Amino acid sequence: MEGVKSLLSGKVKYLLLFIVLLAAGVCGISVGLDFWQEWRTPPEQIVGEAMLYAAEAPMYSYTSEAVRIDDGKEILLSCMNGQKKGENVHLFGSVDVVDSQVDVYQIGDTFYRKDIVNGSWMKMTGQNLEATEYLLQEINPLGCLILHANAEVTELKKENVNNINCRRFQVRSSGENSFLTSVWNEFFYTVWIDKEHRLQKAEVIAGSHEHQGEQLKLTVYFDWECPVEDILPPV
């Protein structure tokens, strides 16, 4: 009887070892397939998916900084914070070039802008609405992240962004923001994209139409994890 127990015990050990090795092999094959599939995915597709995710994601927040580079000297233009939930956006921060604070809500198709002097909220209609839309084109960093389909994409070395391992890509595109393209040209993008194909960081550098040696530099950091409360009209 003891011999039978010993034999069964040995077989159970080998069976368990086989199951463990099989599971490890399956996991290894799965990881390998994922790596192979990711490796053979065209860079243009990865960047395109990340841009589309940023446009369609239901919720996220971001911070941005814009500077003007004039003959190597950086001049701060704006520092903005943004939140998006559903169709609604809240954008606030400082526009240093005019020494002013900005606080704007977009609730569906309606804009609300805070009067910094008296603290009241203005609901944008007519000419005021056009002015606010123009302002948003200028200060909203997401407006820079719309690329032409024929953008040239080159993969660079991987880098960590806030302890997240990212693939880094350089993109050359003319952009599609009507305000920006009227002032700036020769857009060069660097984007850092995580394994979920989400933007973790984006940097845009553009040259001036009129002033040689003058550039715009915009840097945006994204946060996809922190929850965003419902964005409601401020009044």
Image (tube, rainbow, N blue to C red):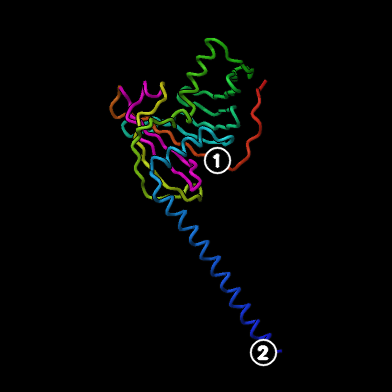
**201 and 35: which one is in front?**
35
Q: Which residue is mark 2?
A: 3
Of marks 2 and 1, the one in the foreground: 2
Can residue 14 be spotted in the picture? yes
> Relative to 169, is 108 above or below?
above
Label 1: element kind: strand
Q: Position of residue 52 (x, y in %)?
A: 48, 35
Name the amino acid, label 2: Gly
The residue most toward the left is: 212
Percent across and percent down for residue 40 are 39, 49
- Which residue is at a point 52% across and 28% down the rendered structure image? 94
Label 1 crowd bin: few (<14), some (14–19), many (20+), radius 10 Å: some
Q: Which residues are magenta?
A: 180-209
Residue shown at the point (66%, 31%) measured from the top left: 230
In the rendered image, which quarter is residue 110 located in? top right
Q: Which residue corresponds to mark 1? A: 223
Q: Give yes or no for residue 188 being in the magenta stretch.
A: yes
Question: Split into 4 quadrants, where in the image is the N terminus?
Answer: bottom right
